Image (cartoon, rainbow, N blue to C red):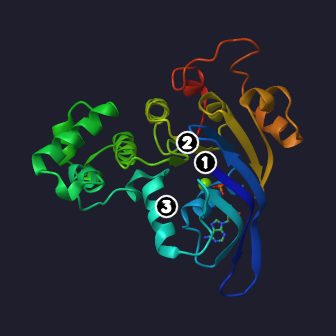
Amino acid sequence: MLQVDSLVLTVTDPDSGQATEILHGNSFTLGSGEALGLVGESGSGKSMTLKCILGIEPSSARVEGSIELDGTDLLGSGGEELRRIRANDLALISQNPHGSLNPVLPVGRFLIEGMSDARSLPAAQARTRAAELLRQVGIDDTERVLRSYPHQLSGGMLQRVVIAGAMSGDPKLLLADEPTTALDVTTQAEVVAILDEKRREHGLSMIYVTHDLDLAAAICDRLAVMKDGEILEIGTPEEIRDRPKTEYTRALMSARPQLYPDGAPQPAPGTGPLTNTEDRA
Ligand SMILES: Nc1ncnc2c1ncn2[C@@H]1O[C@H](COP(=O)(O)OP(=O)(O)O)[C@@H](O)[C@H]1O
Ligand SMILES: [Mg+2]
């Protein structure tokens, strides 16, 4: 469903005029319903890759290569249509949920405005549906949450609201950029589990960005290991673990405690020891 080919991102410093290449010709594909983990250290170009897909790279940047979503090149011409495709088909869940929510709207209004048929829907019905969306992401006191403004809710609660909102928009592709990094450890596990469950339920494709190889391995079908703006290798979690192609991947793994020795069954995401022993700060 998504095909990224030879993606190059170059940013130019407006003062010095100096151009720096940030992404160096990366290619990867994503199948329908598939989850790809984009894994690498801070500064390796993970967020920039998502920004290129979303069309929100810095204004000083030049993007080359191609990014095809179901046959449409998102880097092609046709600004208005591409904006519509991106708005309808892509959903971003970022590290900071405040960035996705409107600070001056109660959560209920935010969810209702995100509904595709918001205008034609009677208010009471829209409200019922917003409450239902919240219940689907594990929120029980829906009336209180619907009435609350973003600053009145915890980060974990807000991230659930963002996930609920993303699902209601019926996207094809979910782009998750370290969505739990800013949360406390227990909440991280809950939010990862909800995201994973909702994605599978809706049959969505996903790119999950993280520096946490174990987490990515637990929830993704394939992993792409990134370093310094380059994808070093792509494979299933088993391939990456058992037959790493690069020293860097080996180092990334040996930097982690051995949580799942060969043959040991892996716990469901968010329930295993990694949720307690990992430091994802
Ligand atoms: N607005 C920007 N302008 C120029 N360079 C940037 C900008 N934002 C990030 N970078 C650079 O791009 C590289 C990749 O950043 P990023 O994609 O945010 O990394 P990651 O998400 O993997 O931590 C880094 O070297 C960073 O310094
Ligand atoms: Mg990032």
Sequence order check: which comes first, mark 2 or mark 1? Answer: 1
Residue to which mark 1 is pinned = 1
Sequence order check: which comes first, mark 2 or mark 3? Answer: 3
Residue 55, horizontal then vertical, whole percent:
55, 66
* Picture residue at 55% right of the left edge, 27% below the top: 275
Comparing 126 with 134, the one in front is 126
Q: Quadrant of the C terminus?
A: top right
Say if mark 2 contacts mark 1, CB within 8 Å.
Answer: yes
Q: Amino acid at mark 3?
A: Arg
Q: CA distance from mark 2 to mark 1?
A: 8 Å
Residue to which mark 2 is pinned = 205
Ligand 1 in which quarter: bottom right
Dot 2: what SS? Answer: strand
Q: Amino acid at mark 2?
A: Ser
Lateral position of residue 106 relative to residue 275, left or right: left
Q: Which mark is residue 86?
A: 3
Dot 1: what SS? Answer: loop
Lateral position of residue 158 relative to residue 59, left or right: left
Q: CA distance from mark 2 to mark 3?
A: 14 Å
* Discs 2/1, front: 1
